[in-house]
Amino acid sequence: MPAAADLLEGRGRIDEAIETTRVRMEAGHPMALESCTRLLARHGRAEEAFTLLRPHIGEPSLAVALVEVAAPAVCDEQAAALLTAQTEHQCSNFEHVYAARARVVAVAWKVFS
């Protein structure tokens, strides 16, 4: 998370911290989307974070972030369906699909256990 947003969050200025990460996100900073969504999830806005991450399911670090915010957003099944669809889209060989599904299940198991 950007230092300014981290400081703001530490001082309880959550809305300002979120706005800081949103500005960076909209400017195209590569790590800002993940920072913003994790910040949202930490402060009771997991559904909003999940919605922001959905279009980026194909990016591995953002897919992990999506899985992590899915539980508080009560979107576990939706996250699993999105990851499965993405995996099937990227893999043409069924053997690879099942291996990728096993990795998704392993990550989800770690997060939700």
Image (cartoon, rainbow, N blue to C red):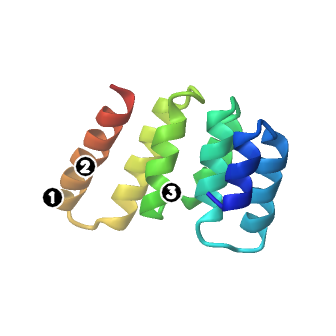
Which is more toward the observer, 60 or 41?
41
In the image, residue 54 above or below residue 106: below
Q: Three-letter amino acid code at disc 3?
A: Leu
Residue 51, quarter of the rendered image: top right
Q: CA distance from mark 2 to mark 3?
A: 15 Å
Mark 1, residue position? 95
Mark 3, residue position? 62
Pointers 3 and 1 in contact (C-beta within 8 Å): no
Mark 2, residue position? 103
Q: From the top left corner, tell me how far across and down residue 97 is, in percent.
A: 24, 56
Q: CA distance from mark 2 to mark 1?
A: 13 Å
Residue at x-position 46% and y-position 53%:
63
**Of helix, strand and loop, which one carries label 1?**
helix
Q: Is residue 52 left or right of residue 11?
A: left
Which is more toward the observer, 74 or 18?
18
In the image, residue 65 above or below residue 56: above
Give the position of the N terminus as an image quadrant: bottom right
Q: Three-letter amino acid code at disc 2?
A: Arg
Q: In terms of sequence position, does the residue under pointer 2 or pointer 3 come before the other? A: 3
**Of helix, strand and loop, which one carries label 3?**
helix
Q: In terms of sequence position, does the residue under pointer 2 or pointer 1 come before the other? A: 1
Q: Nearer the viewer, mark 2 or mark 3?
A: 3
Q: In terms of sequence position, does the residue under pointer 3 or pointer 1 come before the other? A: 3
Q: CA distance from mark 3 to mark 1?
A: 24 Å
What is the tally of numbered marks visible in this picture?
Answer: 3
**Of helix, strand and loop, which one carries label 2?**
helix
Q: Three-letter amino acid code at disc 1?
A: Glu
